[in-house]
């Protein structure tokens, strides 16, 4: 079985998908920037400049990670 990466800002606890409180502000910031017209690259640059890690294994953000988040949330609305 392979490990799956859960979308930033979420975790699975006791089989239930839940919001990670420590990452909630970052998710809000991403969508504030996105709604203001900031590019995916611009958002990832801002997060990296703010020293906000994507994960312990791969701390740097890139435009593809930001796009994945924005696309996921647009699809579920």
Image (cartoon, rainbow, N blue to C red):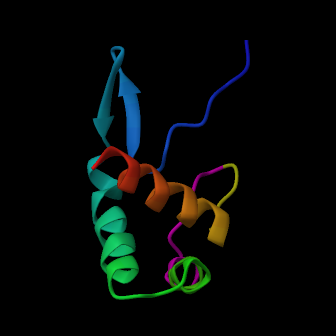
Residue lying furthest right: 2
Quarter of the image with the N terminus in it: top right
Residue 55 within the magenta-colored segment of the rendering: yes
Residue 76 at x, y = what percent? 33, 44
Q: In the image, is residue 26 above or below residue 74? A: below
The residue positioned 73% from the left and 20% from the top of the image is: 2
Residue 66 within the magenta-colored segment of the rendering: no
Question: Is residue 24 something that shows in the picture?
Answer: yes
Q: In the image, is residue 9 above or below residue 27? A: above
35 left or right, relative to 56: left
Q: Nearer the viewer, residue 69 or 10?
A: 69
- When asked about the image quadrant of residue 74, the answer is bottom left
Q: Nearer the viewer, residue 41 or 76?
A: 76
Residues rendered magenta in the picture = 47-56
The residue positioned 64% from the left and 71% from the top of the image is: 63
- When asked about the image quadrant of residue 36, the answer is bottom left
Q: In the image, is residue 52 above or below residue 48? A: above
């Amino acid at each position: 079985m392979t490990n799956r990466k859960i979308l930033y800002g979420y975790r699975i606890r006791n089989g239930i998908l839940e919001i990670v409180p420590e990452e909630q502000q970052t998710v809000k910031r991403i969508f504030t920037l996105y709604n203001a017209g900031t590019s995916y690259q611009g958002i990832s640059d801002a997060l990296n400049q703010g020293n906000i890690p994507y994960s312990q294994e791969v701390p740097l953000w890139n435009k593809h990670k930001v796009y994945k988040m924005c696309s996921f949330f647009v699809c579920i609305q």
